[in-house]
Amino acid sequence: MSNIKGPRGTQDILPGEVEKWQYVESVLADICHRYHYKEVRTPVFEHTELFQRGVGDSTDIVQKEMYTFEDRGGRSITLRPEGTASVVRSFVQHKVYGYPNQPTKLFYFGPMFRYERPQQGRMRQFVQFGIEALGSDDPAIDAEVIALAMNAYQELGLTSLKLVLNSLGDLESRKNHREALIAHFKPHKDELCEDCQMRLETNPMRVLDCKKDREHPAMETAPSILDYLNKESREYFETVKSVLDKMGIPYVIDPNLVRGLDYYNHTAFEIMSEAEGFGAITTLSGGGRYNGLVEEVGGPETAGIGFALSIERLLMALDAEGIELPIDEQLDCYVVTVGDEAKKEAASIVYQLRQAGIQVDKDYADKKMKAQFKAADRLRAKYVLVLGEDELQNNQINLKNMDTGDQQTIKLEEIVEHMKKEFKED
């Protein structure tokens, strides 16, 4: 019988690597706390209709990439491919729009699932961090969301970043641009890929986002959404840019930036890594405004904006820039024992030290004393406590500082308080 392996496009994050994830997630959560965003946790699977309506039938995600199945009750269920639709569904279902403190500012972590060709930094199960600000159509909150995203990357030490910005305009602006795009691409329809031929009828703006046809000459001469923004949309975009200017956050305007989901309007943005060796796909995160999404899933008219990033791609960018995360892999304390009675007493000491907040471990493999010391070295223990039959008879335990080599003898009943003081001084 062959060994069972994890499904293609998934990964196991083992000790030694998982600490990086924990550190990155703690930094992101701390930044959200400073920006006054609260965590929300939603189910890993939802009714398929949520993503059909929320993400959009014309998107690659809905058409090609979703993990959809029928449950035992005959309902169509989908593993979530992205986080925004679920957060908005929760916002509507629990009538969070009626809470007194608005806008509602939320963040989330969680696994997402997309059936696509696995490649470096792009898995079939991947972990996403995202934020959503619901209930404000103030351009300043667009700038806040972008600032939080940039702040997150910079706080982790990334410097090779590029913020790309665009406006997708309001419904009127998009309608006029849509007509111009159809007129522009129609003469070239037969030259476009099969997907773009279909998009031309359903959502022509997505033709600009096509990876296959990006080199087609018609792409370069395609009408820009910026030329079709009405007065309100233009003013909105100018305000977003002016707030970013005030914050000192540099950006580049790209009129072809459209984002991959149907629910975006007005502000759209992506953050890229320009680090050498990062890879062909440079996007780290993206987001934008989605003023019609809450109504689409059954809620009242509510403005919204958010962004999401992949933790996998964030860790890739840190590697590309050679950034070492400040992870302390040292063990506080290791207990070495000699003899059966000492081993029993050590179980009590270890338990008491752990209750006192000290990270401690001991031997569970009946190793000789020398091998136990080697284990303490491998675990980079800061202190080693040695308990043998003689120490036990004298109601004492030996303490060794592994950095300095200093040794001292402590009374057994005083060891917990002594160790608490040692770590307080550290």
Image: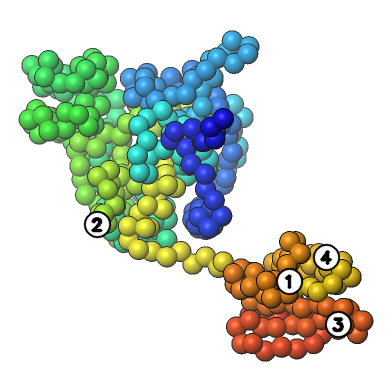
Spatial CA distance of label 2 from label 3 is 58 Å
Q: Which amino acid type is shown beneath numbered disc 1?
A: Lys
Instruction: Determine which residue is flagged by label 1.
Output: 368
Question: In front: mark 3 or mark 4?
Answer: 3
**Residue at the spot x=21%, y=17% of the render?**
194
| Marked residue nearer the N-terminal end (4 or 2) | 2
- Secondary element at image label 3: helix
Residue neighbourhood size for the residue with mark 1, other residues' Cα within 10 Å, grouped as few (<14), some (14–19), many (≥20): some
Residue 23 percent across, percent down from the top left: 52, 58
Which kind of residue does numbered mark 2 sit on?
Answer: Glu
Residue identifier under label 4: 347
Answer whether residue 400 is visible to the viewer in this image: yes
> Dot 3 corresponds to which residue?
391
- Above or below, 309 against 51 in this view is below
Contact between marks 1 and 2 (CB within 8 A): the answer is: no
Q: Are marks 2 and 3 in contact (CB under 8 Å)?
A: no
Residue position marked by numbered label 2 in the rendering = 276
Q: How far apart are marks 1 and 4 (CA)?
A: 17 Å
Residue 360 at what x, y percent from top left?
71, 67
Separation of disc 4 and disc 2 at Cα?
Answer: 51 Å
Task: Answer with mark 1 or mark 4, whichever residue precedes in sequence.
Answer: 4
Give amino acid for label 3.
Glu
Query: Which mark is drawn over residue 241?
Result: none
Q: Nearer the viewer, residue 18 or 396?
A: 396
Q: Considering the numbered disc 2 on the image, is that residue within a helix, a strand or a loop?
A: loop
The residue located at (80%, 87%) in the rendering is 409
Q: Where is residue 228 in the image (x, y as percent from the top left)?
A: 18, 30
Q: Quadrant of residue 281?
A: top left
